[in-house]
């Protein structure tokens, strides 16, 4: 070993001990007669001290030739620091070197290797191996390690077995786009990289491995954003001889274990909400329940409430839905602030045509942007329905029900952020249940699986598959934390006849279903047990636990928003010889 201790290990109890350290030069501070070097490794920083009259002249002169990020080995004696540093673990001591050996010199890095670096995202991604030396990035990867470690500990304790499934599989038409891999030995044929191990874990259930899990890499060729990468990691799980309640209890236990072991938080029981209620109260199937501001309807399509029609205000009269939120304590918003909110919801990303407000003043009076049409008595009815109090501000959006709910969801989240109600150190969990099994694609004029084709319908809804497919509820569930879907799963279809029926509803011919999923259908004829499972987005879980918005901060070598690894310049072209060997035409040949 080139060191006896790490740079984060030495304490006062080590004073007078001879030690050898190795690491990178973080900083050098030269005060003429005294020179300090901060030596850094993964574990921390140890200060080296060299003094004229104490340190040999040759060693002192050599120390002055060092640069930032030089790889250095230092041998010397541990001494007590005169000016202690309480901000680092080694702040009570320093090392007085008797030998300094440069193991490798270094160019000046393109950005500061410090917690508050001067490097932008693009520059740090290009030199990711340097970015990984910074404490915040290192801590993120250490958190990821602990999350994986504790996941395996919990799953092992529940008698799950970790099984690796294939990475080169068959492309399927459902879901996101596949990444495809040409087969040299089978010209003109392609593998696909798995979007999930779904069919393989179901086959493992048929095989009798009744409790399976895997921390697995998955791939989706889809548009990217902060919480998506072309390659990502799942905690993938499946169980046999279970019902929905068993799955929820088992994996609520996993999440509770992770919070306790990694964050030191005792998580309360996870509440449950149906998909229908989530959409009605929050306009989202992954509501952020750290704060209130639930939706309140003043008019809806079912006609069970209408406090807006017949007053001559055409916008509300023609609307399918008039719905709003109550922003507590915001009646003091100026007209300029409300106009800015109106402009915010009218942005193309949100798409609202406008925003109506009702200000419930501290003196009990009510003032709105539609006073021309609605008297104060009517506004008071609205305020009562919202359970508003003096000092509150009611914000209303109207129009098509689906669009209005989505627009109001965005406004609710924005208000939650502006009011400081979305604290990343506060965690609110929620199970969302009873999703629709199917959704209709107007453009394609056919039904699509809301989750995937193997999700079982609620048993009581199976008779509706032929008469009213859109009303069929899935035996499916999502786990939501702070408005982020971190896990989703379902009870699976395990009966060949029902699976064939599902494929038919989704527009598969018998031949297409057999070609794509014949292996699974055949397996169902050999004693498939009832089974279900769930998959957690491991990268998302890590980012939530780390209080960050982007999953890239918790991936060692992430891609950028264009799906590129700018460090290794990938994806890249391959040679004409490789293309020919793979039986792939070049772009020029294809034209």
Image: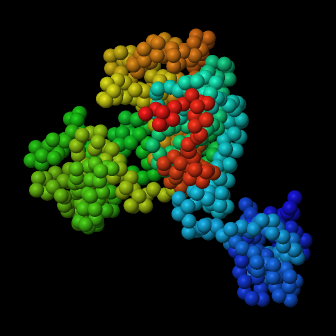
Who's the residue at 18% across and 58% down the image?
369
User: In the rendered view of the protein, which quadrant contains the C terminus?
Assistant: top left
Answer whether residue 269 is visible to the viewer in this image. no
Count of all numbered marks drawn on residues in the image: 0
Q: Position of residue 477 (x, y in %)?
A: 49, 33
| The one of 376 and 431 positioned closer to us in this rendering | 431
Who's the residue at 68% across and 31% down the image?
164
| The one of 202 and 63 positioned closer to us in this rendering | 63
Image coloring type:
rainbow
Who's the residue at 33% across and 27% down the image?
444
| The one of 326 and 580 positioned closer to us in this rendering | 580
Q: Residue 76 is drawn in which quadrant? A: bottom right
Who's the residue at 29% across and 39% down the image?
402
Q: Position of residue 531 (x, y in %)?
A: 58, 23
Q: Residue 275 is drawn in which quadrant? A: top left
Q: Is residue 210 above or below residue 543?
A: above
Q: Is residue 216 above or below residue 240?
A: below
Q: Position of residue 491 (x, y in %)?
A: 52, 25
Q: Is residue 517 above or below residue 352?
A: above
Q: Residue 321 is drawn in which quadrant? A: top left
User: In the rendered view of the protein, which quadrant contains the N terminus?
Assistant: bottom right
Q: Position of residue 289 (x, y in %)?
A: 44, 48
Q: Is residue 88 left or right of residue 550?
A: right
Q: Is residue 17 above or below residue 6?
A: below
Answer whether residue 213 is visible to the viewer in this image. yes
Q: Is residue 500 left or right of residue 379?
A: right
């Amino acid at each position: 070993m080139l060191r006896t201790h790490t740079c984060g290990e030495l304490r006062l109890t080590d004073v007078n001990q001879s030690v050898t350290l190795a690491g990178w030069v973080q900083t050098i501070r030269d005060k003429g007669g005294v020179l300090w070097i901060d030596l850094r490794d993964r574990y921390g920083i140890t200060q080296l001290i060299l003094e004229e009259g104490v340190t040999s002249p040759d060693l002192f002169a050599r120390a002055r030739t060092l640069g930032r990020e030089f790889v250095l080995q230092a041998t010397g004696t541990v001494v007590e620091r005169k000016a202690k540093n309480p901000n680092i673990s080694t702040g009570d001591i320093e090392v007085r070197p008797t030998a300094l050996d440069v193991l490798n010199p270094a160019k000046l890095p393109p950005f500061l290797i410090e917690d508050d670096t001067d490097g932008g995202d693009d520059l740090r991604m290009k030199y990711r191996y340097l970015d990984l030396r910074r404490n915040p990035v290192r801590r993120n990867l250490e958190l990821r390690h602990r999350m994986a470690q504790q996941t395996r500990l919990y799953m092992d304790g529940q008698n799950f077995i970790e099984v690796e499934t294939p990475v080169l599989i068959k492309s399927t038409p459902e879901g996101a786009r596949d990444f495809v891999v040409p087969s040299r030995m089978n010209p003109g044929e392609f593998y696909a990289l798995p979007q999930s191990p779904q069919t393989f874990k179901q086959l493992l259930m048929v095989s009798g491995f009744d409790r399976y899990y895997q921390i697995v890499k998955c791939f989706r060729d889809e548009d990217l954003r902060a919480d998506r990468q072309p390659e990502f990691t799942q905690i993938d799980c499946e169980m046999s001889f279970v019902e929905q309640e068993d799955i929820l209890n088992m994996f609520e236990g996993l999440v509770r274990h992770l919070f306790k072991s990694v964050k030191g938080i005792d998580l309360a029981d996870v509440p449950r909400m149906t998909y229908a209620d989530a959409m009605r109260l929050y306009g989202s199937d992954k509501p952020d329940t750290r704060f209130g501001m639930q939706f309140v309807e003043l008019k809806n399509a079912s006609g069970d409430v209408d406090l807006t029609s017949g007053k001559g205000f055409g916008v509300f009269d023609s609307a399918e839905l008039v719905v709003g939120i109550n922003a507590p304590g915001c009646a003091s918003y100026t007209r300029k602030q409300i106009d800015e909110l109106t402009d915010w919801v009218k942005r193309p990303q949100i798409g609202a045509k406008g925003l109506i407000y009702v200000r419930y003043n501290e003196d009990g009076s009510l003032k709105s942007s539609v006073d021309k049409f609605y008297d104060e008595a009517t506004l008071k009815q609205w305020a009562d329905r919202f359970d508003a109090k003096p000092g509150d501000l009611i914000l209303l959006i109207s129009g098509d029900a689906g669009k209005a709910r989505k627009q109001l969801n965005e406004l609710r989240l924005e208000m939650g952020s502006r009011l400081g109600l979305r604290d990343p150190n506060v965690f609110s969990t929620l199970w969302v249940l009873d999703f629709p099994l199917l959704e209709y694609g107007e453009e394609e004029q056919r039904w699509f699986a809301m989750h995937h084709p193997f999700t079982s319908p609620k048993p009581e809804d199976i008779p509706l598959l032929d008469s009213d497919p859109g009303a069929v509820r899935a035996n499916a569930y999502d786990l939501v934390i702070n408005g982020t879907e971190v896990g989703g799963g379902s009870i699976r279809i395990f009966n060949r006849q029902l699976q064939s029926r599902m494929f038919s509803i989704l527009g598969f011919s018998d031949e297409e279903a057999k070609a794509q999923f014949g292996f699974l259908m055949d397996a169902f004829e050999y004693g498939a047990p009832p089974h279900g499972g769930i998959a957690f987005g491991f990268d998302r879980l890590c980012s939530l636990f780390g209080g960050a918005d982007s999953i890239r901060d918790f991936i060692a070598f992430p891609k950028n928003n264009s799906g590129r690894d700018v460090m290794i310049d990938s994806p890249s072209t391959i040679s004409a010889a490789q293309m020919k060997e793979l039986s792939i035409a070049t772009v020029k040949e294809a034209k």
